[in-house]
Image (cartoon, helix red, strand yellow):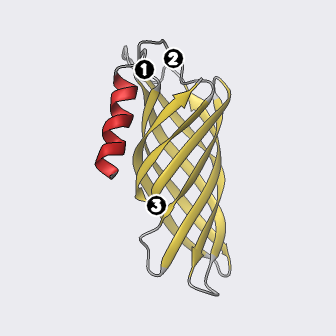
Amino acid sequence: MKKIVLVIFLFVALFSVQSFSQSKGFGLGIIVGEPTGISAKYWITPTTAFDFGLGYSFEKNSQMHLHADYLFHVNNLFQTNENIKLYYGPGARLKLVDVGDSRLGFRFDVGLDWIPQNTPIDVFVEIAPLLDIIPETDFSFNGGFGVRFFFN
């Protein structure tokens, strides 16, 4: 079933005949890494966006991971014809674990976003240092890569 969904997703993304701009609108896709799950992005301006994640964390005893970030994008950082943006920004993370050990903390997301021309997708890779503050202070990392389809 997962393979069928992925094939349909890629088919729609690669063979769309419309011209899209991924610097606006809402995108939904997947992220693979820590955590693995659903990724969403909502552009506020051409250089700022909200980023959301809902997935499974592979850390010990984890069940679910939720995060939300406010991202700033830097355009034209790389000398290339491709649209590659550096992004960074603060956020929050909630990790639901077995009873009594859930965690709440801050994260700072840094990544690269490749936006292929004339397609409704973006491809990204990111890393996010984490500082949990509840129930205790702890430092760790999240990271992964993913793809999103944008609905305009």
Mark with earlier residue (2, 3): 2
Q: Secondary structure at mark 2?
A: loop
Report the quarter where the C terminus lies.
top right
Q: Which residue is mark 1?
A: 119
Residue at the spot x=56%, y=84% of the render? 98
Q: Secondary structure at mark 3?
A: loop
Label 3 crowding class (10 Å Cα cut-off): few <14, some 14-19, many 20+? many
> Marks 2 and 3, how far apart in space?
28 Å
Mark with earlier residue (3, 1): 3
Q: Which residue is mark 3?
A: 35
* Discs 2, 1 touching: Cβ within 8 Å: yes
State left or right for residue 47 relative to residue 77: right
Check disc 1 and give the amino acid type: Thr
Residue at the spot x=62%, y=24% of the render? 24
Mark with earlier residue (2, 1): 2
Check disc 3 and give the amino acid type: Pro
Residue 32 % position (x, y) = 39, 53
Residue 71 % position (x, y) = 63, 39
Nearer to us in this view, 51 or 14? 14
Nearer to us in this view, 54 or 51? 54
Q: Which residue is mark 2?
A: 20
Q: Any mark on residue 145, and which?
A: none
> Marks 2 and 1, how far apart in space?
6 Å
Residue 146 % position (x, y) = 41, 44
Q: Nearer the viewer, mark 3 or mark 1?
A: 1
State left or right for residue 64 relative to residue 134: left
Q: Secondary structure at mark 1?
A: loop
Nearer to us in this view, 41 or 103? 41
Check disc 2 and give the amino acid type: Phe
